[in-house]
Amino acid sequence: MAILEVKGIKKRFGDNEVLKGIDFSLEKGEVIAIIGSSGSGKTTLLRCLNFLEFADEGTISVNGEVLYDGVAESSAKKKLKNDDKRLRKQRLHFGLVFQNFNLFPHKSVMGNLMLAPVLQAKSELSFMERWRFERSDAYASIHEKALSTLARVGLSEKQNSYPCELSGGQQQRVAIARALVMNPDILCFDEPTSALDPELTGEVLKVIRELKDSDTTMIVVTHEMEFARDVADKVIYMAGGVIEEAGTPEEVFGHPKSERTKAFLASRKNAASDEK
Amino acid sequence: MLTGFGETCLLFILTLVCALPLGLLICFGSISKIKPIRWLMKTIVWIIRGTPLLLQIIVVFYGPGLLFDYPMRSRFIAVLIAFVINYACYFSEIYRGGIESITKGQYEACAVLGMTKVQAFFHVILPQVIKRIIPPMSNEIITLVKDTSLARIIGVIELITVSQQIVNNYVILWPLFYAGAFYLVFNGLLTLLFGFIEKKLNYYKV
Ligand SMILES: Nc1ncnc2c1ncn2[C@@H]1O[C@H](COP(=O)(O)OP(=O)(O)O)[C@@H](O)[C@H]1O
Ligand SMILES: [Mg+2]
């Protein structure tokens, strides 16, 4: 069974129909790369999956459970919005790594990783237990988990640094670790290297590659075509709010069927050679 | 003259203690999604910030007596209420500026990590707001120290009143000097304190 099944997602902002029916599915451990020119709705799609936006129509199912059904619950927006507890629980199926990191500047690296899990654990405790929480086993295990996750992104020695003391690449790796600590079923990346200097993109892409090797299920929106080609199991090309073409990297990059895809890939190729 | 010092300090401290949290409440009101609350708060803030504090003190002191036949018994309480309302409105605008300066991304990062709105506010937003509002807050608080001298308008015996009585009675000027020196020292200490807090919060940059 697919870990994620997305059907008929539509989303409009006023008169602007940004997503016009998106369908795809994802198996556990698979990586999907989403490519497409800017304005094609890639960010909006990820935001709908993370419930930062609410799709007008369509369903989102994880592990066979329908998390969101825009048609059946015509007032799903309101329902979910008002049911904060359910909304938060559903969000935790997904992780999101933002283009511009959005780390918490006032927290150290470990503070960034531990804040959400600590708050989550504490919220289930009584007042007195919260008081002693930092000496509990639960706290120790969160700490350990954060440390080991930090090691996965290669930043163990930075645990006490603040985000402002790190390079962009390091900040993005912290952001990835922060998302991983919450154990999402599916980790989404929205152009994780677009805000980085070219020489820093490599370290972030390397971390994503390693995550794939450890079977993390991922959706990666990216402009790095070579990366998409050799990391992704499936590639989706989005244009004007629809999936214009989808398939294996070999199919989409090697033998694109649609003229639009061909044109887009050609334009990316030119952009890439201009950079070099 | 000591009673004068005492009243001035008491007025200052009580105003701060009440106006800082009240300001935050007013601020929540003025950024609330509920329109009537937002408009009400914005109007109150507009009126309070648009009229002199002196006038507000007079209104609070004489207003209840004239309107409801329920005269204010304590001059000190009247002044305190006027100060708290006035400063809460100014503080609320400072809080608002601070809260609005935090990017949407911070809220979204909290949301995708499964935090509640309350958790996000107290653990992520507010700590950053505090750092940003320390400089404007310290200005406002130093103004408050000097504004306490307005209390004399309705006869609260604060520092300047006492000094002036002495000046009039004994035809000497130095008590006013002392009063001036008191304000200087008081504000000097506050400036040092805020400088210290700012330094403390400088462990990260934005
Ligand atoms: N919150 C919003 N309100 C109105 N329009 C939006 C909003 N978010 C995105 N859009 C519009 O949706 C379209 C797709 O945007 P986006 O999903 O960011 O595309 P991409 O990530 O592929 O560049 C754009 O035309 C953008 O202006
Ligand atoms: Mg985008």
Image (tube, coloured by chain):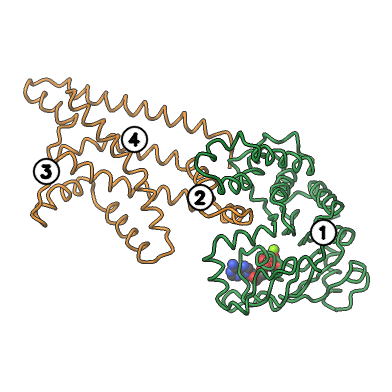
Nearer to us in this view, B152 or A190: A190
Q: Nearer the viewer, mark 2 or mark 4?
A: 2
Q: Chain of mark 4?
A: B
Q: Which residue is mark 3?
A: B73
Label drawn at residue B107? none
Task: Say which label, 3 or 4, has the lower sequence index.
Answer: 3
Q: Which chain is orange?
A: B
Judging by the rendered image, the residue that carries numbered circle 4 is B142
Which chain appears green?
A
Q: Which secondary structure, mark 1?
A: loop
Q: Report the residue at 75% width, 43% height from top.
A: A149
The residue at which mark 2 appears reads as: B121
Per the image, the residue denoted by label 1 is A224
Give the SS element for disc 3.
loop
Task: Indicate which disc, 2 or 4, sits on the residue closer to the N terminus.
Answer: 2
Numbered disc 4: secondary structure: helix
